[in-house]
Image: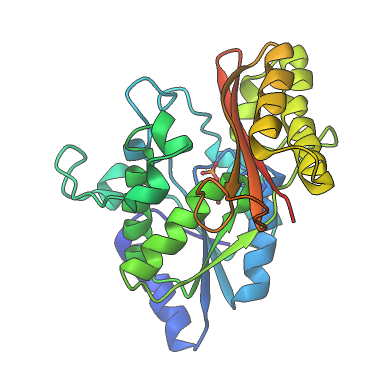
Amino acid sequence: MERAVGRDSLRKITSRWRRDGCSIALVPTMGNLHDGHLALLRFARKRADRTVVSVYVNPTQFGPSEDFAKYPRTLEADLEALHAAGCDLAFTPDDACVYPGGLADAVRILAAPSLSSVLEGQRRPGHFDGVVTVLARLFNLVGPDVAVFGEKDFQQLLIIRHMAEDLGYPVAIESAPTVREASGLAMSSRNRYLDRAQKAAAARINAALLEAVHALKGGAASPERVERTGEEALSREGMRVDYFAVRRASDLAVPGPGERGLRVLAAAWCGQTRLIDNVPVD
Ligand code: AMP
């Protein structure tokens, strides 16, 4: 596995690959890699001749009261895991490489308003602007044919698809399913903040989502009723629920009666840790 920290070393490697006629897949991450990230890498390896995994904790997608400073940074272990999983290039830029004009003066992109103002976007103002901004940089730096994202961050996936299309990036946005612990808890770098009891409670998020799917498929319960039941189930476990929502999977709109193609999405606080998860209905 090769490693690039700056733009020049990155370009040298990707230009060589291009000269050899190789296609490139990019898997953007913030590091502290787990099996969910590695599943994206495995997926990417099937989609292109060469894989790049970027590891960069992007400051512009964190709000002022969020966990940027304490976000887990485990670069050495990440590099070992990437090497073992057959990654071709680990791209580990610093702020100066991603934001050469300085963070304070960075040119920013705004995520599509309709997709980014609801659910996560409502609770984390500016978050998705930071996400599309860093991805624009990463796409320009790496020049991938394919970029792979997890369904775990379903709203982010929709926003990135829209961004790539709207800005005309010649990159195919692909997605891979959420990887879970045996308990159903979606793997996340933030799970390491949880103690044992919190981890057990957090597993209820996925259980409640699956119960919601079951109820919706049964057809007896309305989406509003299903949302209330889910919220109550998580509150009973001591979680503070940001949302438990049944939405149209294509654009996150509130579904009309009898509509198909739905997704159930939830965000809840387990102690000081905010967790998200979602599942498809059909
Ligand atoms: P992050 O490092 O949290 O920014 O995530 C980097 C990428 O990994 C994103 O595309 C996430 O959606 C994806 N990801 C995170 N957790 C999982 C998971 N449990 N299963 C599949 N993909 C995941």
Q: Looking at the picture, tell me which residue is in the foreground, 60 or 92.
A: 60
In the drawing, does residue 223 fall left or right of residue 200? Answer: left
Query: Can the viewer see residue 142?
Result: no
In the drawing, does residue 128 fall left or right of residue 52? Answer: left
Q: Looking at the picture, tell me which residue is in the foreground, 111 or 133.
A: 111
Q: Position of residue 163 (x, y in %)?
A: 37, 61
Relative vertical location of residue 55 with respect to residue 202 in this rendering, above or below: below
Q: Quadrant of the N terminus?
A: bottom right
Residue 117 placement: quadrant: top left
Q: Which residue appears at 61% of the width and 61% of the height?
A: 175
Q: Quadrant of the C terminus?
A: bottom right
Residue 32 placement: quadrant: top right
Q: Position of residue 184 (x, y in %)?
A: 80, 36
Q: Which residue appears at 36% of the width and 52% of the height?
A: 132
Q: Looking at the picture, tell me which residue is in the foreground, 215 or 109.
A: 215
In the drawing, does residue 256 fall left or right of residue 233? Answer: left
Q: Which residue appears at 74% of the width and 20% of the height?
A: 233
Q: Position of residue 125 (x, y in %)?
A: 34, 33
